[in-house]
């Protein structure tokens, strides 16, 4: 539907979404979700994880015309899943929406005076509470936006599927297995979801993938116990020195990667163009070191278009109480964040070959179990990317920041690899939100604008003349 009537109807729905925030309903509804202490890292909260889905989410979705089911996790370490569907027609596009209702530990007693983790408090622009930013507030915004379109149009104009998991904060245990088993019920033309922060609080961000991560230990375990450095110095190999030598083969003094197999081939001209004007700093953290990382790349290219190596922890001897002795063991916990265009199967074998060639055969490489996430990325000129960015700009009159992938990692590969769909993420938080820390919060202006953005986007998807790309979902009921 085109013309002034269509425009006025869209505007009315977007205005109604803003009013939902302005009159206090959003904060009221968010407080009801935050009140569930869904700490997935705490085994004692297993019943709360289930209650969040059955009591807080499922009745709301059923009232909006969704059929819902709650399913056990195939992995005993993980919490349950909620799958919901509103089916409007076999020939319509299907949109999958995702969120997670679990949170990290509340960290009671560590929040500033007057704040409690599972009680929402509003102080000016900030809406405090555990899970506000990660991720209850974000998937609540998307659910409310769907409700606003149904209220304004009488229907969505597309088929909607929603999955809420309860184990994201513990590594999404069982998520891949569940998706494989539920492939038909979760199939869609696109994933549109929200997690993570905006690059800048006053400008919408769209990202379409994430960097992958591989975590491993470098270990030199040479002997039992430590031995006096005067008696044995010059006679016993020092494991800390071996680890230091190994690390020096991975990057140079400014952190630029030295191993050819660890350098991606995907920083193409279109990706470079998408990253060219993106901000990296936002006044909510330390200033980046301009002389760190690949010298021929911009800071945005280093963060979003390239691979980066970090030493997460190192130990040898007793750092808190050093003694005059040569340690028997040393360890460095390491991580490579990588983008698409990286041969992940070659990463650790390439390191092994270099260590052996430099006489460091005594340094072991021990991969972490569950320490690997694949990288994902959707092309900046993909039709879904362009469609979403155009809709966001139409609503906000701001050109969104477009990231081909986050600098961080999330389980986006379950959507791209198992379900075979493009993915578009629109975060409703900001980098200073204290995610995973005391005083976690959402910013009111971002919440309000997020409600408008998502209502406008879902309205546009349901428009008869949307001309949406179809990516293989059949559009039939699961």
Image (spheres, rainbow, N blue to C red):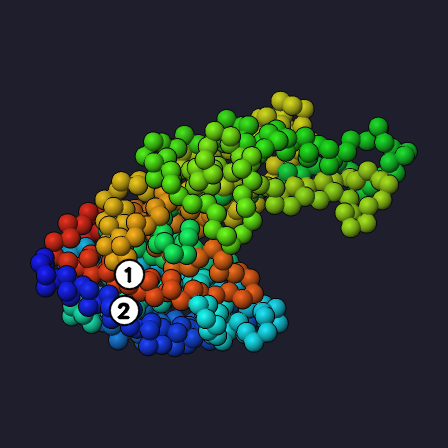
The reply to whether discs 2 and 1 touch (Cβ–Cβ < 8 Å) is: yes
Name which residue lies at 68% across and 34% down.
244
Q: Quadrant of residue 360?
A: top right
Q: Secondary structure at mark 1?
A: helix
Q: Can see residue 221?
A: no
In the image shown, does 296 or 94 lie closer to the viewer?
296
Q: Quadrant of residue 314?
A: top right
Rendered location of residue 372, percent (x, y): 49, 44
Name which residue lies at 20% across and 56% down.
461
Residue 454: which disc?
A: 1
From this viewpoint, which residue is outermost toward the top? 357
Name which residue lies at 38% across and 59% down.
428
Vertical arrangement, residue 192 with respect to residue 83, above or below? above
Q: Nearer the viewer, mark 2 or mark 1?
A: 2
Q: Earlier in the sequence, mark 2 or mark 1?
A: 2
- Neighbourhood count class around disc 1 (C-alpha, 10 Å): few under 14, some 14–19, many 20 upward: many
Rendered location of residue 27, percent (x, y): 39, 74
Name which residue lies at 64% across and 46% down.
313
Residue 17: which disc?
A: 2
In the image shown, does 63 or 30 lie closer to the viewer?
30
């Amino acid at each position: 539907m085109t013309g002034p009537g269509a425009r006025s109807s869209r505007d009315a729905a977007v205005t109604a979404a803003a009013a939902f925030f302005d009159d206090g309903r959003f904060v009221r509804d968010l407080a009801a979700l935050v009140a569930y202490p869904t700490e997935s890292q705490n085994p004692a909260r297993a019943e709360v994880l289930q209650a969040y889905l059955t009591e807080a989410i499922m009745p709301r979705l059923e009232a909006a015309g969704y059929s819902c089911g709650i399913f056990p996790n195939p992995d005993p370490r993980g919490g349950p899943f909620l799958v919901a569907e509103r089916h409007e027609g076999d020939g319509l596009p299907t949109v999958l929406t995702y969120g997670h209702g679990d949170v990290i530990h509340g960290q009671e007693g560590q929040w500033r005076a007057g704040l409690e983790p599972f009680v929402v408090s509003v102080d000016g622009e900030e809406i405090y509470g555990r899970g506000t930013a990660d991720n209850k507030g974000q998937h609540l915004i998307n659910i409310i936006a769907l409700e606003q379109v149904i209220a304004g149009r009488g229907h969505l104009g597309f088929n909607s599927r929603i999955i809420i998991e309860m184990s994201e904060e513990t590594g999404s245990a069982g998520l891949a297995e569940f998706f494989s088993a539920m492939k038909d019920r979760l199939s869609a033309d696109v994933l549109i979801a929200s997690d993570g922060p905006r690059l800048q609080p006053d400008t919408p961000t769209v990202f379409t993938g994430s960097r992958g991560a591989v975590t491993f230990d470098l270990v030199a375990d040479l002997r039992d116990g430590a031995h006096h450095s005067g008696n044995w110095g010059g006679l016993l190999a020092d494991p800390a020195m071996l680890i230091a030598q190994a690390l020096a083969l991975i990057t140079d003094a400014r952190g630029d990667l030295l191993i050819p197999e660890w350098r991606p081939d995907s920083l193409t001209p279109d990706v470079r163009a998408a990253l060219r004007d993106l901000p990296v700093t936002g006044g909510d953290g330390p200033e980046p070191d301009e002389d760190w990382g690949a010298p021929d790349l911009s800071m945005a290219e280093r963060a979003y278009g390239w691979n980066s190596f970090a030493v997460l922890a190192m130990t040898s001897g007793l750092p808190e109480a050093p003694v005059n002795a040569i340690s028997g063991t040393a360890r460095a916990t390491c991580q490579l964040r990588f983008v698409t265009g990286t041969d992940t199967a070659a990463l650790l074998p390439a390191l092994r070959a270099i260590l052996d060639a430099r006489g460091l055969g005594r340094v072991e490489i021990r991969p972490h179990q569950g320490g690997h996430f694949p990288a994902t990325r959707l092309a900046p000129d993909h039709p879904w990317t362009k469609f979403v960015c155009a809709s966001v700009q139409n609503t906000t009159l701001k050109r969104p920041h477009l990231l081909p992938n986050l600098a961080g990692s999330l389980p986006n590969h379950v959507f791209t690899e198992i379900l075979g769909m493009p993915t578009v993420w629109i975060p409703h938080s900001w980098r200073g939100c204290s995610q995973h820390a005391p005083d976690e919060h959402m910013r009111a202006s971002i919440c309000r604008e997020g409600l408008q953005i998502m209502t406008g986007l879902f309205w546009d998807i349901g428009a008869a003349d949307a001309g949406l790309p179809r990516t293989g979902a059949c559009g039939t009921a699961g």
